Structures are given as C-alpha cells and as structure tokens.
Amino acid sequence: MTWTTLPRSELTSGLSGWQGGSGPSALLIHGVGLRAEAWGAMIPQLSKHFHVTAPDLPGHGESSPLKAAQDKGLHPFTDCMAELLEHLPGPTLVIGHSLGALISLDLTIRHPDHVAAVAPLNAIYRRTQKAAYAVQARAADLVKSPNADPSPTVERWFGKDPQGDLAPMAEHCRSWLTAGNPQGYARAYHVFAHADGPSDEALAELQRPSLFITGADEPNSTPEMSRAMARMAPQGQAVVIENARHMMPMTHAKDVADQIIAFHQQLGSGHV
C-alpha cells in the first residue's frame, strides 16, 4: 500500500476531507494525531460498496482547529461530524477509530437520525487506573511540549524497529504527527485521554446496530472492552481481529473492511 496524499475538498466550513466511491453513505473518522490518509488501505475496498467520506478532524491535516472558546470535551468534535452528516445522502454508516470511535458513538447517541449504524474500532471503555494515569500523563506532556518527538507513540503502535510492510506505515504516522497542528493534536489527545467511553445508560439505549472491532493483541482498547460494550448495546456485536493491535485499520485493513462490509450486508438482509 502506498500512503499517498488524498485529494481534498472542503466538506463543510473549515472541515477538509476526501470523498469517493458509490453506494450508501459511509463516514470514516480517524484517530488522534492522524488524518484521512490513515484510512488509505481500507478506502479502495470500502469505496466499492459505499460512497465514502473521510474528513480530517478539526486541528488535523488540512482542517481548521476548533475555536478556543469552545468546550474542551468531546462534543465539539462530534458536532462538526454531525454538521457534516447533514450534507451526506441518507442515513450514514459511521466508522471511527480510537478517538474517532468515541466520536462515532457520541454521534450515534446524540444524533441517531443521521446514523444508519456504527462501527467503533479500538474503542476504549472503562480504562484501568494504571492505563488512565499513563494516557493522561502523556496528554499533560503534550500540553507542555506540543512539538515533542513522536517516536514513543510510533513505537507503541508499531514496535521498536518495525520491519517489512510496517516500516512505511510507521514512517507515515510519524510524518503526520510531526506535520500536524501541535495545539490541535494536544487538544484532541487531552479529550481522548480523559474519556472513558460512553455511559452504561447510553449504551443500553443505543438505537442503531453497532459493530465493535478491536485487535486480539490490543493492550489498551482491549477485546473485553469491545465485548462489554457489545453486550450492553441492544443491537451490538463484537469482533476481534487476530494478531492485530491499535493500528489495525492500517495493519489489518482487509480484515477490518471485510467485517464492516459483512456487517452492512447483514443490515440489508435484516439480520444483525
């Protein structure tokens, strides 16, 4: 896979992204510090089945940052995606990774009329105290040094010395983290670090079919987190991708896309 820059267009005011493919609408929401290209390995397959929209989150890629006066939590990110959904044809399959998974769930909970179904990838839910402390410490360090070396992050995602196909993935992630808006990255990471997933009440009242996918070797967004959320959601399913970790939309793109396409086909047949 060549991680080339995707051609951008203005999706809504201040929000840049890529659109293509044909079929029912699908929205791809990337993780913190990344950009639309993080979906580059999945887009060719998904575009055969969906009209795909892949935005850069606010303060990422070519999208404008959120206004300083806006609430510092998750809702401003969700509200930008809700505005975008109003411009897309019909109810949309919303697919989100990591921070994007949190946004996708919040979007489905707060704006269900625009959402046909949701597929949160590597979503967190009730972190352990140790995990919460670690991610919040990293968020605090980013506020102090927003231009810090991204090597520790890249190493967590791909290992100390990635080889083969992992090497270009790691280098592109490094370049996205380095070239992005430092303040936008720090703000988004703070939101991600202090989130703990949707409330149990919200999950129990989730009105749309939900496919929770994570990697079997994912230490932070663990398989049990996805299974727990799927058990609470009335129309929830959980899938665990073998030998995958946090960056499975890149490292296991075909496996993840296959699961999403099969999920959508189940919706069409009425079996979820």
Image (spheres, rainbow, N blue to C red):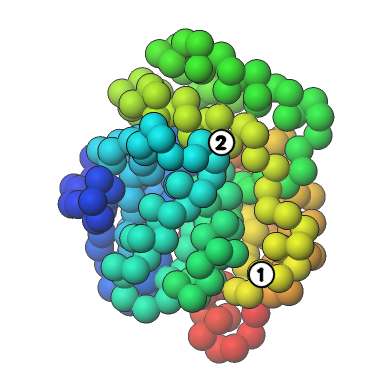
Marks 2/1: CA–CA distance = 22 Å
Residue at which label 1 appears: 206
Instruction: Categorize mark 2 by other alpha carbons within 10 Å: few (<14), some (14-19), many (20+).
Output: many
Q: Residue at x 44, y 16 (%)?
A: 146
Q: What's the mark number on residue 191?
A: 2
Give the left or right position of residue 75, taking residue 224 as reference: left
Residue 54 in the image, given as x and y percentages of width and height: 34, 54
Q: Amino acid at mark 1?
A: Leu
Q: Residue at x 35, y 37 (%)?
A: 67
Q: Nearer the viewer, residue 231 or 40?
A: 231
Q: Amino acid at mark 2?
A: Val
Residue 7 in the image, given as x and y percentages of width and height: 18, 47
Q: Nearer the viewer, residue 253 or 202?
A: 202
Determine if residue 243 is in view.
no
Determine if residue 264 is in view.
yes
Q: Is residue 260 above or below residue 171?
A: below
Residue 158, image quadrant:
top right
Instruction: Categorize mark 1 by other alpha carbons within 10 Å: few (<14), some (14-19), many (20+).
Output: many
Residue 270 in the image, given as x and y percentages of width and height: 59, 88
